[in-house]
Image (cartoon, grey):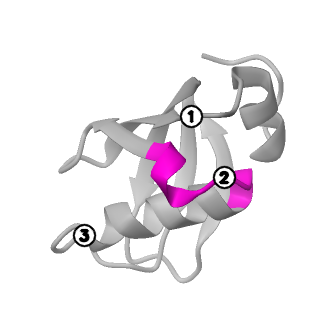
Amino acid sequence: MARITIRLSPRASREEIAGERDGAVLVRVTAPPVDGAANEALVKLLAKTLRVPKSAVAIVSGETSRTKLVEVHGVEEADLRARLGLGAGGG
């Protein structure tokens, strides 16, 4: 299991993992931050990118915030970072 900090940008022009800044992975989704749509889009994008089922991705904290702590089961930290196209380090 791995945990990552996500900085979510809803209502973006496209969905993407946009790199990393200040220890948080920048993620853009097209969904608006209404009725959990942006969170759902985040989980879907991470599951697809990491090649894990959506049930393996959980938002641990920050449901209503742009900064979220996400837990991914079945993937180790280094593998998760590699699949997201990030460096092996970070925090």
Q: Residue at x 53, y 30 (%)?
A: 4
How far is mark 3 from mark 1, CA to CA?
Answer: 25 Å
Tell me if residue 22 can be seen. no
Q: Residues within 10 Å of mark 2 (few under 14, many from 20)?
A: some
Q: Residue at x 80, y 31 (%)?
A: 79
Image coordinates of residue 85 in percent, x first then y, are 82, 45
Q: Nearer the viewer, residue 26 or 70?
A: 70
Residue at image mark 1: 73
How far is mark 2 from mark 1, CA to CA?
Answer: 8 Å
Pointer 3 with pointer 1, Cβ within 8 A: no
Q: Residue at x 78, y 23 (%)?
A: 78
Residue at image mark 3: 33
Which amino acid lies under the numbered mark 3 shown in the image of this protein?
Pro
Which amino acid lies under the numbered mark 2 shown in the image of this protein?
Val
For this view, does 65 lie left or right of residue 81? left
Image coordinates of residue 70 in percent, x first then y, are 44, 37
Q: Which residues are magenta?
A: 49-57
Image coordinates of residue 3 in percent, x first then y, are 52, 26
Q: Residue at x 82, y 22 (%)?
A: 88
Pointer 2 with pointer 1, Cβ within 8 A: yes
Q: Earlier in the sequence, mark 3 or mark 2?
A: 3
Q: Quadrant of the C terminus?
A: top right
Q: Residues within 10 Å of mark 1 (few under 14, many from 20)?
A: some
Tell me if residue 15 can be seen. yes
Q: Is residue 31 above or below residue 74?
A: below
- The secondary element bearing badge 2 is classed as loop
Which amino acid lies under the numbered mark 1 shown in the image of this protein?
His
Q: Is residue 62 above or below residue 43?
A: above
Residue at image mark 2: 52
- Whether residue 52 appears in magenta in the rendering, the answer is yes
